[in-house]
Amino acid sequence: MTATYHTGERSAAICLGCDPREGQNRGNSHRPRRGRIGYCPSFICRLCREQGCSASHCPHRGRSTNSTGDGTQRKEHEIYLTTTEKTFQYDEDLPTVPVPPLHQTLDRYLKSVRPHATQEEYETTKEIVRKFELGIGRELHKKLLAYADKKRNWLEDWWLHYAYLMYREPILPMMNTVGPQPLNATLQKPSIEKAAMYGSQYLWGFLMFNLALREQRIKPHKTKEGKPMSMNQFRYLFNCTRIPGQGADSLYSCWKPKDEGECPLHIILLCHGHIWTVYPWDSSGKPLNPPELEVQIRYIRERSEALGPGPGVGVLTCDTRDNWCQNRDWLKSLSLNNMKTLELIESSSFVFVLDDSEPEDEKEVLLVGMCGDTSNRWADKSVSAILTRNGCGIMNNDHTPFDAMVSVMMGHYQCLLLTDMNNVSTDSREVRSVPSPTLLHFDLDTKMYAAIAEAKETSLSYVKNIQVQKYVVTEYGRDFLRPYNLHPDSYVQMAIQLAYTRLHGKTAATYETATIRQFYNGRTETTRSATVESGEFVNAMLDPKAKNAEKRQRLITAVNSHNELMGECQKCEGVDRHLFGLYIIALEAGIDIPDIFTDPLFTKSGGGGNYTLSTSLVGYTPVYGGVSAMTSHGYGVFYSIRPDGFQFFVSHFRSSGESDGDQLVAALRESFCDMRRVISQPPASL
């Protein structure tokens, strides 16, 4: 199950039951795979679970799924927990974020723009890049190196400020991420009668994860070599709120692990336009059990409906950021009560929404999560859990403080926890006497009522423009690809390239998330998935004269090229973040923006946040979700990879005269079918 290989300083045990990049079972290959950083703690590898593993980084080390080694039953959700380490104990020891060599970045930039350029455009850009490297680019790079020399993460503050906090459109639905609870399709199928019970268990799962995180029992993530990865983003999962400002927002966070101090533990429940606060903990510091939480949920639902529709102040958070800033300042100025109420909301652990919708399928669930009743939301909170009237659970999270892997991991932990408990808390089912929820009030004047009405109109114009699709490939998945040694993520990326070109007749500038969490407070780099090699693969697939042998070889080459590119990006050797740093150096120094950033090919290739395809692998678990498209004519394409299938979340804007999610899904279906046929053809018949 394990092997050792020389790392230069020591020998490290490697988990061979899973691909180190993503936990993919590699069968009996018995050799470490080169490539991406992986998250054994995040993804379940079946071979390890079944047979046990001795690799130090593998969560299934030395045991099978059903046994702890001492004869006791081991629960699935415990793969995320630790008793020997602390969640954040390695964060301060991580290496600083490096600045790659300028020449290397510019060479890779030129390679990345080639698929989007005519020969004339490419030659023009080559000359612009040459002048940049020999001139202002060299000076900006020196300044960036000097700035980075004083920082452990030169990118962190800039990325938060310019990529997130300066965004002025409504963050719901334009930026927030959304993902359904997998149990909606298994243990908690829609039921109005059982909705409160489902909601209590869903809520309990959040509380249990927060407790484990505060006690630092969440296992720190590590690379395939067993090196720690940054867990810093988990500090912003609870008790975190985006505060609106003029021109730029700010983050307010008051969460702490127990060994660093106390933090607020109350939560906010929204129902029918009303706002309630609940303290969901008992005197011993444990979460109230699900039956007790169910009583609270039923009380809030019944009282809110008896009161009639509330003022829906939360819709103000779904307005443009500058409008919300002005309205928030006015709201605070009206009374001390308003200031205290805002503080209660913004300091709360998270928001739990009791929604009035009754979605009939998962596509409707996704729309509720992404574009639901904005008068019953508080978009600024880092975590909002939504429970529909018929018991469907879905998360809506502010993307500002953390990336999707944080909420995906929490969602999978909850799914495993509730499955392990068979939907019943291990605590007593006795319903103890606990304080009733408290209804919060805002003092509103005619100006605020008018602002709420205007915010509803603005919000409605945005949410009506979003369309989402769910698509599941059921014919084959990760297991099918193993014998061909094709990495499933790279394979999916090629399917996306083929589908888009088949539909639109051109190559799309494509963003895919690459993690740089092996560095201090690292977040992401951009993998530019549209490459020369992917273009050659797509052309071969669409050429009726091309033979299967050529198509197969082009696919293998494109997949391997993408795999190498992802590995470079995860080492902070990509293109976009370095160019971003050079741009910000010029911007903040008052230097004229260099030609490389105003070159049309910079935008055409995706620079400056202009990626037609915004894509991301969200993991290898049943948890999936996504976010809106990056551009008005583009798509958001997010997917999870399973042993027997691929699960997609596709978004686009209804107002676009170019993008069409239904047609893209149809093109994806055709691409997966064609690619399977190409790679599975016996070599002798090629």
Image (cartoon, helix red, strand yellow):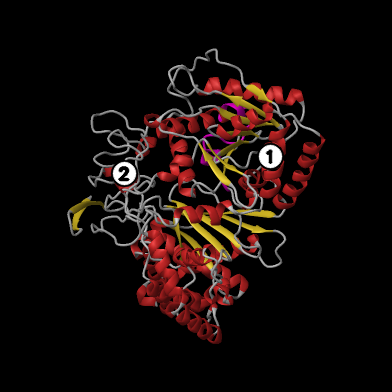
Q: How many marks?
A: 2
Occupied quadrant, residue 214: top left
Q: Residue at x 66, y 33 (%)?
A: 389
**Residues at discs 2 and 1 in contact (Cβ within 8 Å):** no
In which quadrant of the rendered view does residue 96 lie?
Answer: bottom left
Image quarter of the C terminus? bottom left
- Where 131 falls versus 40 (above or below)? below
Q: Residues within 10 Å of mark 2 (few under 14, many from 20)?
A: some
Is there any visible trace of residue 116 in the rendered image?
yes
- Residue 221 rendering spot, x and y as whole percentages: 35, 46
Residue found farthest to the top: 433
* Amino acid type for the residue under numbered disc 1: Arg
Q: Residue at point 54% right, 65% down?
A: 587
- Crowding at label 1, few (<14), some or many (≥20) Cα neighbours within 10 Å? many
Please tell me which residue is depicted at 58% across the width and 66% down the height of the picture: 610
Q: Is residue 373 visible?
A: no
Residue 94 at x, y = what percent? Answer: 32, 50
Residue 90: mark in rendering: 2
Asked whether, in this view, residue 378 is left or right of residue 456, the answer is left
Per the rendered image, the range of residues in magenta is: 177-198
Instruction: Report which residue position mark 1 lands on.
Output: 328
